[in-house]
Amino acid sequence: MAGDAGSIPELDQKKYDSDEQVKIICLGDSAVGKSNRPQQLSTYALTLYKHTATVGNKTVAIDFWDTAGQERFQSMHPSYYHKAHACIMVFDVQRKITYKNLANWYKELREFRPEIPCCVVANKIDADLKVTQRSFNFGKKEGIPFYFVSAADGTNVVKMFREMITRAVEYKQNPSDFMDEVLQELENFDLEEKEDPEADEVGLKTESPELE
Ligand SMILES: Nc1nc2c(ncn2[C@@H]2O[C@H](COP(=O)(O)OP(=O)(O)OP(=O)(O)O)[C@@H](O)[C@H]2O)c(=O)[nH]1
Ligand SMILES: [Mg+2]
């Protein structure tokens, strides 16, 4: 695959310029449950979960971007953030450090995407339901929505995804980010096809799981 990355349609981020395509990214430490799958040696650096939803009277295709591996370096490749319309930040209620690290993830997110909607997800509540009585203040000041979730038993998962999809679509229709608009303008001028420089580094996998 190496050397021919420009021909991988999934990695062509131009598609996110069209009205019907939305990109939502997941951030958070390793093993917080972003992908909700048994621990495995990561073969793929990047997985796109594909989903379609109806928002208003429009059908929208959503790509959920999920990575394995890069989180260990506490930093993501800039292309991960590129053109993202919303971000889901996940921590594990059983591991305090993953909650503390949200601040780092949020800082990096805002460097690349200053205005996109985001939320905080407290995952694995099935392991200890008492945590739902605790209050987690991260993001409160900024008004970032917070969800108690169990990816394992499905609690709040569909609700969270639905709300994030709606917010992503709203953001796309009405970006509050001045830089977004400038970049969009610049891209309209850039008529040349370019090779995707980072595509060599990722193994790509796409999946279409049911959200409900
Ligand atoms: N009890 C419980 N375990 C969960 C839940 N979600 C995920 N897990 C478990 O947590 C472990 C890590 O889950 P992953 O989905 O691999 O976590 P990740 O954040 O995608 O990790 P990386 O891909 O390494 O970044 C696995 O053993 C999952 O089975 C949950 O809601 N409840
Ligand atoms: Mg994962």
Image (cartoon, rainbow, N blue to C red):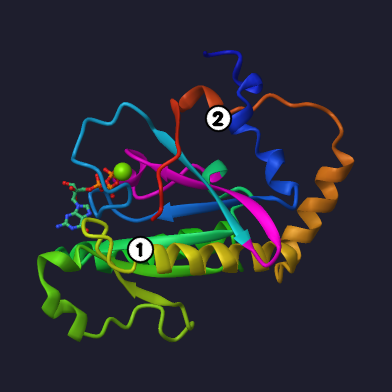
Corner quadrant of residue 9: top right
Residue 157 numbered tag: 1
For label 2, being within 8 Å of ligand 1 is answered no
Res. 50 in view: yes
Q: Closer to the camera, 69 or 57?
A: 57
Residue at 38% across, 56% down: 212
Corner quadrant of residue 15: top right
Image x and y of residue 39, in percent: 18, 39
- Alpha carbon of mark 1 to alpha carbon of mark 2: how far? 31 Å
Q: Which residue is mark 2?
A: 198
Closest to the camera, between mark 1 and mark 2, is 1
Residue 149 numbered tag: none
Q: Which residues are magenta?
A: 55-78
Image x and y of residue 7, in percent: 65, 20
**204 relative to 16 in the view: left or right:** left
**71 relative to 88 in the view: left or right:** left
Name the quarter showing ligand 2: top left
Q: Looking at the image, is 200 positioned above or below residue 48?
A: above
Image x and y of residue 49, in percent: 46, 42
